[in-house]
Amino acid sequence: MNMAINIEASDFDQEILQQGELISDNLNMLRLEQYPPDAEKGLRSFSLAEVADYLGVTQNHIKKLHLEGKGPVPATTSSGRRTYTAEQMLELRQFLDKNGRSDFKRYVPHRRGGEPLQIVSVVNFKGGSGKTTTTAHLAQYLALTGHRVLAIDLDPQASLTALHGIQPELDKNPSLFETLRYDDQRKSITEVIQPTNFPGLDIVPANLELQEYEYQTPLAASNKSSTEGRLFFTRISNALKEVEDRYDVVVIDCPPQLGYLTLTALTASTSVLITVHPQMLDIMSMSQFLLMLGGILESIKGAGARVKLNWFRYLVTRYEPTDGPQAQMVGFMQAMFSKRMLQNHMLKSTAISDAGITKQTLYEVEKNQFTRSTYDRALECLNAVNAEVTGLIHKAWGRK
């Protein structure tokens, strides 16, 4: 009997390795088909209506600029339909900012003197809460609305990384672990930042090596001759000091566990967004997460690990308003801490999940791939959530 078990265990080890390699190879084939010839993601053009919405001006205003020969020249179809690339949208934003009223420059929302870098961590203890989807769309929305954004994927599973066209096990991009590690091979964060297909949005990819931080940190903390391990929670904030002049907002996708990676991200954060799926088991899991987090932060407070936040909010994700139990759970949460909940909820949408099949977000896909009402409803909801978060970021800067 024991011999049979050992053989099965050995076979299982080999089988899962082979299956992992098989999945990776086939995903790479799909990527090469989607983004030939160099397997890099592009980005669609944006309609006049979308550009006007992101810039906060009327469509007629943009049309007038084009007719007067001002700003970038859009692509125009035979029917007169205008589209702009994301780069042109940034160029148009700069033009409007430079040539608008001198006392009201709202088109380029970059940080001004005295406004600190905003670091938003998106967290949840339970997988499947929409954490990565939330992070990706928030980072891209901030970039589309003119902010300089750095997205950091701290989850070794690297879903955020994959959404931005990087396949970790094949592309061999370094992760933030190279900046967090405790030995003499540590790299500057500038060496691990990668551009994305969104102008104004960079990313620090993830890979399985990030998990090493969970093992190295307690060993470093036990080394009495060094303070590095005992002050592990400063490592992300210290790394970001090297590039804080390059960005307005950092958005961190935390792993779905309460380990050293999550704690290091939280102590670097200026704000926290907790995603929650409105079902009983998910809310019970969130309760345990909060209890554990509070206890751990209390225990390491003496070492200087203080979480000083401008704000934190709960975001209801994958919400189905017609589902009675879900509506009841949302009411339950609102009754307990209404001031800590985002007013807008992220509705469950087939448009978002279908876009994810091709490793795209709703901001990337062409709307003609969906039923118009489905796409419009999802995008309206998504923009409402992200605009509310953007408002909180601006409020933290003292803007009205």
Image (cartoon, grey):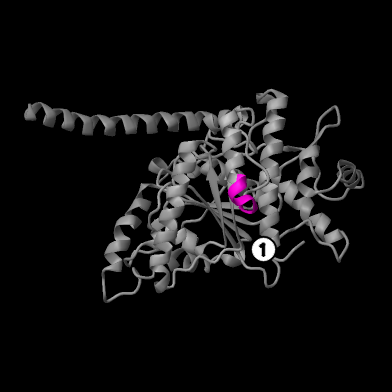
**In the image, farthest residue toward the top:** 371
**Could you say where residue 377 lies in the image, as x and y percent from the top left?**
70, 31
State the predominant SS element of the stretch in magenta. helix
Instruction: Name the residue located 60 percent from the left edge and 40 percent from the top edge.
Output: 330
Of residues 118 and 301, which is closer to you in this image? 301
Instruction: Name the residue located 41 percent from the left edge and 28 percent from the top edge.
Output: 26
Q: Which residue is mark 1?
A: 396
SS at mark 1 in the image = helix
Residue 280, above or below 300: above
**Could you say where residue 184 lies in the image, as x and y percent from the top left?**
32, 67
Taking the image as drawn, is residue 87 in sight? yes
Instruction: Name the residue located 46 percent from the left edge and 56 percent from the top edge.
Output: 192
Horizontally, residue 46 falls left or right of residue 170, namely right
**Could you say where residue 357 lies in the image, as x and y percent from the top left?**
52, 29
Read off the magenta span.
334-340
Of residues 36 and 83, which is closer to you in this image? 83
Q: Amino acid at mark 1?
A: Ala
Quarter of the N terminus within the rendering? top left
Classify residue 264 by image quadrant. Answer: bottom left
Residue 238, above or below 62: below
**Could you say where residue 363 lies in the image, as x and y percent from the top left?**
65, 38
> Does 336 lie within the magenta span?
yes
